[in-house]
Image (spheres, helix red, strand yellow):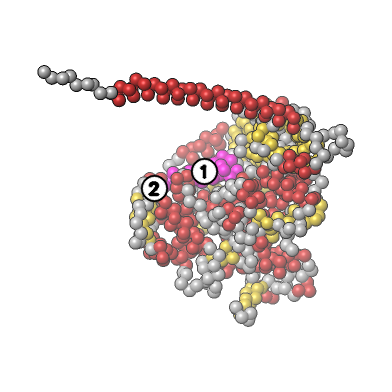
Amino acid sequence: MRTPKHEGLNLRKVVNYLLVPTIVIMLEHFLILVAVAYWVWSKIKAYFTEVFKKQLFRIDLNWKVPGRVGETVILTVWILEKSSDPAVIQEIVNDLTIEIKKGDNVVVPVKELMFPDNEKELVSVQFKFSVRVAGEHWIKVFHRRRNIEGSPMKVEFLPLFVEPSKSTLLRACPLITWVKGVSEVLEIQLRDKYENNCKLFDVSLSSLKFSCRNADESIRPDETSAYYKHKFYPAAYSNRVVLSATFSRCGVYHGKITYKEQGIHNGEFSIIVISTEEKINFQTILNSSNPNWQAFEGRLLVHDQDLQKEMRKIFIYVCPSIIYVREYFLKIIPIKVANFRLSTMTKIDILMMNDKDSTYTFTITDKIQPKVTVEMSAQLARVVMAMFSHYLSRRIGGSENFDCKQRTFSKHLRDTNMELRFTIKQIKIARFDIIESSYKATKGFKAKDWYKNFRIEFKNEPGIDGGGLRREWLNILCTKFFENNSKGLFCSLGNSRLVHPNDSQKRSSQLKMYHYQLAGNIVGKCMFETACGDSYKQMVNGRFSRSFLAQILGLPPTYRHFEQDDPEFYLGKVRYILENDVNPMELTFSEEEYNADGKMIKVVDLITNGSKISVTNETKEEYLNVLARYRLATRVQKEVEAFLKGLHEIVPDDLLCNFDEFELELLMCGKSEFEVSDLRKNYSSSSWAWDTNSRKILDWFWAAINNMTDEEKGRLLQFTTGSALLPHGGFKSLDPKFNIEFSGRIGSLPTAQTCVNRICLSDHYTFEQFEKNLKTAIYEGSEGFGFA
C-alpha cells in the first residue's frame, strides 16, 4: 500500500494570483498620485505665474495699431514693483528682454530705463524700434525667459507710401519692341522707401504718368503725344499696376514713367515700334535655318571718332552673343570694322530720323570697342534693333536683377553640357604635390572633358569619391592658387588683402603660364559645378582685386580701382595728384620702373612718346587712367590672358559679360549670408571710444544691419573689408577683426579702411538719417572711402 505524497506549495501560482495583482494595483495608485500631484503643481504654478505677471509688469503700445514701417515706435513695459533699492530695479530691468520677428527678419530695439520724476510714478523700460518689413510681427517680452502678461502679441505694420526710386518697372531689357496698332502692357511694382510692396489702396493711379518722346529731337513732344495712347490700371492677379499703351506710328521712342513727377527705377527705356510687315520679316529671320548671318546693309559715317570722307558700305550681323560690323573688299573678302558683345553694356542710340529718305542714323557703343555711327534705312534699322532687343532679353533672362541673370547663366551653362555630366572621369592626384599632379592629370583635357563628373583618388589614401573628394580637391586647389603669396600665382598689391595676378619678376620661377590656365580651368569647373545644383555647389575660395574682376569682364581698369586694390599707392600718389595742382610736379605720361634695391631700371611710356608729354590739371585723370591700365593690366597681360583662356574653355565669355564686378564676385565666390549675431560676437573697437552717446550709434548699427538684404550685407562687407565674402569660419576667422570706430562727427557718411577691416561711424540726430547715410556709403563706396 502506497502512501500519497503531500503536494508542496506552488510558487508560480502564488506569484500569478497574489503578487502580480498587488504590484499592478500599487503601480496604478502611484501613477494616479503622480498625475494628481502634477495637476496640483501646474495649477499652483499657473496661479503664481499670473500673480507674478500682474504684480510686476504691464505693457503699453505707444502707437496706433496697425503701425507704419519706418516709424520709430515705443513699447513701454511698466514695472509695478515699487522698490527704493535701485539695485533691485536694475536687476529686474536686466532680466527684461524683447523679441520682435517676422519670419527670419529680426528687429533689434534700443532699450532705455526711464526713472520717474516723483515717487508716485512707476519705473518703466522703453523699447524703441523701427520696423522695415511690412506685415504681421510677433512681439514677445520676456522676464527671465518667461513671457510676461500681454506677451506674445501679433502686431501688423503697413507699408509706407510709394517711393518712386524704389518702385520698379518690370521690363525685360532697356530696349522693348512693340508692334504698331497692337496694345502692349508693362507691369509696375510700386514699393515704399524700404522696398515693401505698396497696398493698392495707398496708390494714386492719377499720380502715375507715362511720357514718350520721339528719338529724333527735331520732333516736338506735343507732336509725339499724338502717336500713342495709354492708361494705368491695377493688375488682376497681383499687387501691381499695369501700363497699357498703343502706338499708331512706327519709330523709336524714349519712354519714361513717373510717380508724382519723380522717375521710378527702370522707368526710362527705349521703345521700337515696328510694323506688322517688319514683325513678319523679323520672325522669318529668327525662324530661318541660319538667322545669325542675315546681313543688314548700311553706310558707315563715323568710326572711332573719325568722320568718314567717303561713303563706306557696311553690313551688320546681329547674333545671339555678338554684333558684327563688316565691310567687303572686292565684295567677297570680309574686313572687320567692329565687334560688339551683345550685353547690357552695348547701346544702340538713335541720333536722327529722316522721314524724307526714310533713314535712321544711329550709334553702336560699349565701354570697350570704338564707337560706330551708321546710317541705314528705317525698316532695316528697326529690325536690327528688334533683333538686338530679342537676343538681349533672352540672354539676361527677362530681367536685369542679379538673381534672374544668375538663373539664366546657370541654366545655359548646365543645359548645354548636361549630357557630359553623366560621364565619369577618373583622376588620380598626389596630395603632397597637388598643383603639379593636377596639371599632369588634366593637361590633355579638351573643353568637353571639364564638364564630366570627376572622380578623385588621392594617391596612397583609401576612400571612394561620392562628391566629397572632388569638392575637397577643388577647394584645396583654389586655396593654393589664390592665397596671398608674394612668390605665388596671385598676391596682394601694397597692403591690400585682395589678390591680383603676380607678374613674372616677382613670382617663383617654377610657376609658369600654364598654371594660370589651370587656375582658370579650376574656376570654370567650380562655376559649372555650382550651376549643376546644390549637391554640386562649389564656390571659389578667393578674394580677387576689383581690377582683375573687371578684366575678366573685358573692361579696362581705371584709377578708381586703386582705392581697394592698392590702397597704399592710392594714398601715396593717386589721391595727392587728384587733390593738388600737378603743374609743379613735372609729371609726364610715363612710369619709372625700379628693382628690389630701389634702383631705376627703365622708363615706360604710358602713351606714344609719353615721356615727352607733360601732365596738366586738365589731363591728370587721363594720366591716372593710363597709369592704372599699365600697373593693373599691362604688367600682367599674359597672366590674365592665360587665366581667361582656361576659364573660357568651360564658361563662354559671352555668358559673363552681363554681370558687373560685384555681381561677378557673387557669381564666382557666393554670397556672404552672415548672421548679425556672429558679427556681434567677433568685432573689435577701441575701449575708449564707446561712451553713452556712441553706444547709441552702435545699437543703431546693429539695427540697420538687421534691416539689410543679403546683397546689402555683401556690400557692407565689401565696403569695410574690400571683399563681399567672409573667410571660412565667418567673422571669427577674419584677420584683422571687423573693427567699428566712432568718428565724433555728426551727420557725415561712414568711412572705411579696408586694409584693417575698419568702419568709422558718425553720430546722427535720428536713426533714419544714420541708416540712409550707411546705405549711401556702401552703394557708393568710391566716394565713401576714407583713410586716416
Q: Does the magenta stretch mainly form a helix, a strand or a loop?
A: helix
Question: Is 735 placed above or below 588 here?
Answer: above
Q: How many discs mark residues in the rendered view?
A: 2
Q: Is residue 406 magenta?
A: yes
Q: Nearer the viewer, mark 2 or mark 1?
A: 2
| Residue 315 visible somewhere in the drawing | no
Residue 508 horizontal/vertical position (percent)? 50, 72
530 and 434: which is toward the camera: 434
Dot 2: element: helix
Residue at the outermost left position: 1
Residue 130 horizontal/vertical position (percent)? 73, 38
State which quadrant residue 583 falls in.
bottom right
Residue 193 horizontal/vertical position (percent)? 72, 39
**Distance CA(mark 2)–CA(mark 1):** 19 Å
Q: Quadrant of the C terminus?
A: bottom right
Q: Which residues are magenta?
A: 397-417
374 and 390: which is toward the camera: 390
| Residue 454 visible somewhere in the drawing | yes
For the residue carrying disc 2, how many other residues have a C-alpha within 10 Å: few (<14), some (14-19), or many (20+)? some
Q: Which residue type does callout 1 highlight?
A: Thr
Q: Residue at x 48, y 22 (%)?
A: 29
Q: Quadrant of the N terminus?
A: top left
Question: Is 505 placed above or below 314 here?
Answer: below
30 and 562: which is toward the camera: 30
Q: Residue at x 69, y 60 (%)?
A: 753
Question: Is 338 placed above or below 610 here?
Answer: above
Quickly name the residue at label 1. Answer: 408
In the image, 218: left or right of 271? right
Quickly name the residue at label 2. Answer: 421
Residue 411 horizontal/vertical position (percent)? 48, 43
Q: Which residue type does callout 2 highlight?
A: Arg
